[in-house]
Image (tube, helix red, strand yellow):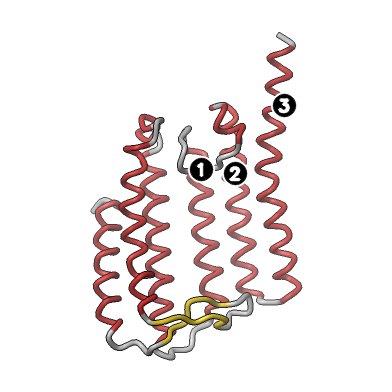
Amino acid sequence: MKKPKLALILSIISLIGTVIAYFYLPDTIPIHWGIDGKVDNTGPKYMAIILGAVPLAIYILMNTLPKIDPKRENYKKHSKAYRIFSFYTILFLIIINWITIIASFGVEMNVGLFIPILVGILFIIIGNYMPQFRHNYFVGIKTPWTLADETNWKKTHFFGGYVFMILGIIIMLMGIIQNPLILYMGLTVSAILVISLYVYSYLLFRKMSKSQKNK
């Protein structure tokens, strides 16, 4: 079965399951966990329906973007990467939805471990396929310089692939170690890595601009 169809089926099944679970949920459910893995915000149980509908909404969005992007032809060049990115993003959202539902029934889970590992895996998968993304307006690292120049886009996404995989490893370690010092160090390094993408893209722009002037 192709990933787009599987993503659709999983999204629908998850939403149906969420609607059924809704009638058995308590009046309030956890909707956010703090960095310590403890619930720090709750909401009315209808939030479960909203969370349950998100994967299906994202599926529809992901299938719409290639049709409305002015650079729609480029989606054919990175169709595999886009399918994988879409599928695992939707799968991640489905899992998060069911973690919320299960936690709502009072089942104790180490959310501080599970969610960082899931996020880390998602980042590693995205990083692995990021260099394959071609010039477009919706998916990828969008800086003024990547959007303005296809060469800048390709080089920044090649660099970004490594950055995202490193970020994924850092996020997983933050969840596994669960130490406040490691947490803040990890967040600091992650912020620096994200900023480095913009710096790298800008430096490429400067370098290419100088090369063109010297011709």
Q: Residues within 10 Å of mark 3 (few under 14, many from 20)?
A: few
Number of numbered markers: 3
Q: Residues within 10 Å of mark 1 (few under 14, many from 20)?
A: some
Residue at 69% over, 48% down: 195
Residue 200 higher or lower than 176, as above or below:
above
Q: Which residue is mark 1?
A: 140
Report which quarter residue 97 is drawn in: bottom left
Contact, CB < 8 Å: mark 1 with mark 3?
Answer: no
Q: Residues within 10 Å of mark 2 (few under 14, many from 20)?
A: many
- Say what secondary structure mark 2 lies in: helix
Q: Position of residue 158 (x, y in %)?
A: 58, 38
Residue 67 higher or lower than 93, as above or below:
above
Contact, CB < 8 Å: mark 1 with mark 2?
Answer: yes
The amino acid on which the numbered mark 2 sits, given as a three-letter code, is Gly
Q: Position of residue 99 (x, y in %)?
A: 43, 77
Q: Which mark is residue 34?
A: none
The residue lying toward the viewer, choosing from 35 and 112, is: 35
> In the picture provided, is 111 more to the left or to the right than 196?
left
Q: Which mark is residue 206?
A: 3
Counting residues from the start of the chain, the first of labels 1 and 3 encountered is: 1
- Say what secondary structure mark 1 lies in: loop
Q: Which residue is mark 2?
A: 160
Counting residues from the start of the chain, the first of labels 1 and 2 encountered is: 1
Q: CA distance from mark 3 to mark 2?
A: 18 Å
Front of the two marks 3 and 2: 3
Q: Position of residue 154 (x, y in %)?
A: 55, 32
